[in-house]
Image: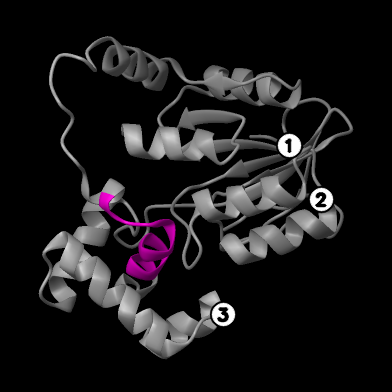
Amino acid sequence: MITALPGYEVVGEAREGKEAIREAISLHPDMILMDLSLPGMNGIEATAQIKRRMPDIRVLVLTVYKTDEYVTETLRVGADGYVLKDASYDEFVIAIQTVISGKKYICPDVSMHLINDFLHRGDAPKAMTPWNKLTARERSILKLVAEGRTNRMTGEFLNISAKTVEKHRANLMHKLGLHNAAELILMALDMGLIEHAGNSTNGVNRANGNSALSSEISSKKPPDGSAFSPE
């Protein structure tokens, strides 16, 4: 859909968050279309690292999640736009054009949800959600462990010791009141940290002589010099 737009070119693809960072550094696209549900490092953390290193790269998030936690955390780490995967093609194009021009874009469904939440924020105290109970590192470990990685594999992925992973894992399970691996996996699914098989996609592209990166999972790699996306 992106390459069909005049002046846009997909310059690369990536299958997970760490690869998205490496490709962003290598290709330096003008825009990245980022999925939040990526294996290993999720899209929020990948966005944060990309924005810290290359703040001029625009990041448009394309996701199924519209809860406050995902929206606010994504915008906090520097994402330039937020659009839902059920958006129409016309809205998708508007989102791309808005972000690539240097402006912010939040899809109507999400912005209305945020406005309503803000207007009613004082009506009642907001309950602490499982997401807010965990630190960013604990969320990463919860995701990796729920994907089936051992403490050692998780530690290697995050560049920390297996003993440190074990400590974080015990802390997060205590915070969430979890007692076994099955409950941990269900919590990760409920929080949107992992998806049921076959639910997501990743990709990267170039617009008006500019480049863009998107995180949609795809089994096909574009030819060299085309475009890059996290899949």
**Label 2–label 1 contact, CB within 8 A:** yes
User: SS for tag 3?
Assistant: loop
User: Would you name the residue on which mark 1 appears?
Assistant: 3
Query: Vertically, is 16 above or below 47?
Result: below
**Which amino acid is tagged 3?**
Asn
Task: Name the chief secondary structure element in magenta.
Answer: helix
Question: Disc 2 to disc 1, how far (Cα)?
Answer: 9 Å
User: Would you name the residue on which mark 2 appears?
Assistant: 226
**Which amino acid is tagged 2?**
Ser
Check residue 150 for magenta coloring: no
First to last magenta residue range: 133-143
Dot in front, 3 or 1: 3
Q: Confirm whether residue 85 shows in the render.
A: no
Q: Is residue 191 left or right of residue 107?
A: left
* Quadrant where the image shows the N terminus: top right
Q: Confirm whether residue 144 shows in the render.
A: yes
Q: Image quadrant of residue 57?
A: top right
The foreground one among 168 and 89 is 168
Q: Residue at x 89, y 33 (%)?
A: 209
Disc with the residue nearer the chain's start (2 vs 1): 1
Dot in front, 2 or 3: 3
Question: Disc 2 to disc 3, how far (Cα)?
Answer: 32 Å
**Percent of width and height locating residue 36:** 47, 48
Q: Residue at x 21, y 44 (%)?
A: 129
